[in-house]
Amino acid sequence: MDSLTRTSTKVPGLRNKVMVDMDQLAALSDALRSSIPADIQEAREILRQKESMVNQAHLEARRIKEGARQEQTARLDDTEIKRQSELKADKVHQDALQKAQEITQDAQRRAYKIVEDAEELSNTRLEGANQYARETLFELEERLSTVLGQVRRGIDTLGIQVETKVPS
């Protein structure tokens, strides 16, 4: 365009009006027409690329946001699972302690009962043994008494015979 303006001639009396060579103007017009669509096409391509980048950025932002939301949910779920697990572990521990205490108390009751039964059986057997010993000793005393009576009669019988034979 600059060359067209430089090569044009001024028309006298028509303020700032010039005459232009028609062939040069047509060539310049053709060049502008052919370059404008290329420039417009290039600008449109740039706009499409810009929109594509913006869309990709939006998609990436959504993906990152969704990933963060899922991670947050997973962490909350993990925290909740951990909390529930700790509560269950505490409950199981408390139940186990209570059960152990019940078992210990039951074992102590059984042990006391066994000791009590053993003492009772021991006392019964001791009483039985003492009774048997008394009965046996009374029976022995009776036998000894009988034997002693026989011995005494024998001595007495011998004593009478000795006195009758020995004159005094």
Image (cartoon, rainbow, N blue to C red):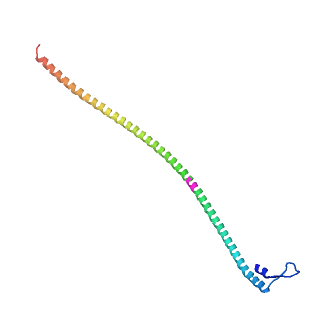
Residue ID at (72%, 80%): 35
Q: Nearer the viewer, residue 140 or 53?
A: 53
Q: Nearer the viewer, residue 48 or 118?
A: 48
Q: Is residue 83 magenta?
A: no
Residue 63: x and y in percent read 62, 65
Residue 131: x and y in percent read 32, 32
Q: Which residues are magenta?
A: 78-82
Q: Quadrant of residue 115?
A: top left
Q: Is residue 143 left or right of residue 60?
A: left
Residue ID at (34%, 36%): 125
Q: Quadrant of residue 153?
A: top left
- Whether residue 154 is visible to the viewer of this picture, yes or no, is yes
Residue ID at (21%, 27%): 147
Is 102 above or below relative to 153?
below
Is 155 above or below relative to 73?
above
User: Is the stretch drawn in magenta largely helix, strand or loop?
Assistant: helix
Q: Is residue 80 magenta?
A: yes
Residue 114: x and y in percent read 40, 40
Q: Is residue 129 left or right of residue 154?
A: right
